Image (tube, rainbow, N blue to C red):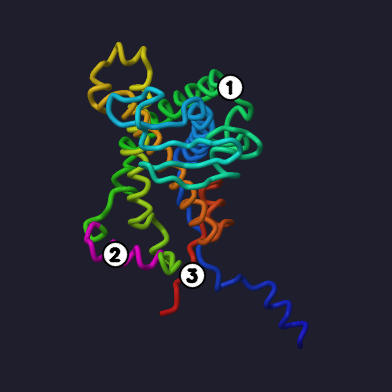
Amino acid sequence: MATHYANADAESPRTDESPLIYRTRLPVRIWHWINALSIFVMLMSGMMIFNAHPRLYWGQYGANFDHPWLVIGHRGTSGYLSLWGHEISTTGFLGYAQNAPYAFPPLVTIPSSYSLSDGRQWHFAFAWVLLITGTLFMVYNIVSGHLQRDLALKREERSFAHLWHDIKEHARLRFPTGEAARSYNPLQKIAYLGVLFVLIPTVILTGCTMSPTLNAAFPWLTELFGGRPSARSIHFLCATGFALFIVVHLLAVLLAGPFNELRSIITGWYRLPKERSK
């Protein structure tokens, strides 16, 4: 009798397993991975470029003896970060790390040995990848309805009460379950829309502003951002925003279940988490 029941259990389908749904379409998955590669290469090559002059300014200032709002430097073997005159010791992380007297250490730059020209070549090459694929993805968003269907905030999601509740749930690490996990939650939508419509366009335009050739062709870019030094500062802040987005994104993937999240962004298939008991 025991054997009979064991076999019956083995042969019967599992009824406690939540459904597997097709959640992430192929164009979204392709753009996600191309975008991830582009951003990582641009961040790392951008840090190499920053090492050539590790100071940031506002306005029309930008010479060696002007007053920067941010400095990542070193005194001997002691690294430091200065933010509006307030100095923080960063030895071993920034300014001086891995026996290298640079703002960002070789471990996180492309190339790993100091070369401004190579850093620029990597940066500009993947800037074109980001621009072209980003443009194609925006066309796909509009034509396919992905933007309106999956990313636009619904009327009830735009209320402060709904957003505040979502923030509190995420702070408690209580992620959406059941049918609520079938689509992006409001915080995901805001983050993705911020990347698509704020970070990516701003980082591209400020990057163009720092190019002397494009300055000559489009002088209004310099006026728009208040000068090339200001454009460089905004470019740096956008890059910092990308880095923070990546950190939060990876933490959310780990906390929500990395296998299920990775399966969704690789194959498109996602298993809905079971409804949380009240």
Does residue 119 lie above or below 253 as drawn?
Answer: above
Q: Is residue 72 magenta?
A: no
- Whether residue 15 sits left or right of residue 172 in the image: it is right
Q: Nearer the viewer, residue 179 or 123?
A: 123
Please say if the residues under marks 3 and 2 sit with CB atoms less than 8 Å apart.
Answer: no
Does residue 132 lie above or below 277 as drawn?
Answer: above
Q: Position of residue 203 (x, y in %)?
A: 37, 32
Q: Amino acid at mark 2?
A: Trp
Helix, strand or loop status at disc 1: loop
Please say if the residues under marks 2 and 1 sit with CB atoms less than 8 Å apart.
Answer: no
- Whether residue 96 sits left or right of residue 137 in the image: it is right
Is residue 140 visible to us here?
no
Q: Residue at x 48, y 70 (%)?
A: 274
Query: In the rendered view of the protein, which quadrant contains the N terminus?
Result: bottom right
Q: Amino acid at mark 3?
A: Lys
Q: Which residue is mark 3?
A: 274
Question: In the picture, residue 94 is in which quadrant?
Answer: top right
Mark 3 or 2 closer to N-term?
2
Q: Amino acid at mark 1?
A: Ser
* Eye-nearest disc, 3 or 1: 1
Query: What residue range appears in magenta?
Result: 158-170
Q: Which residue is mark 1?
A: 115
Is residue 217 visible to us here?
yes
Give me the C-alpha separation between circle 3 and circle 2.
23 Å
* Eye-nearest disc, 3 or 2: 2
Question: In the picture, residue 56 is in which quadrant?
Answer: top left
Packing grade of label 1 (10 A; few <14, some 14-19, many >=20) is some
Dominant secondary structure (helix, strand or loop) of the stretch shown in magenta? helix
Q: Which residue is mark 2?
A: 164
Q: Residue at x 38, y 67 (%)?
A: 169
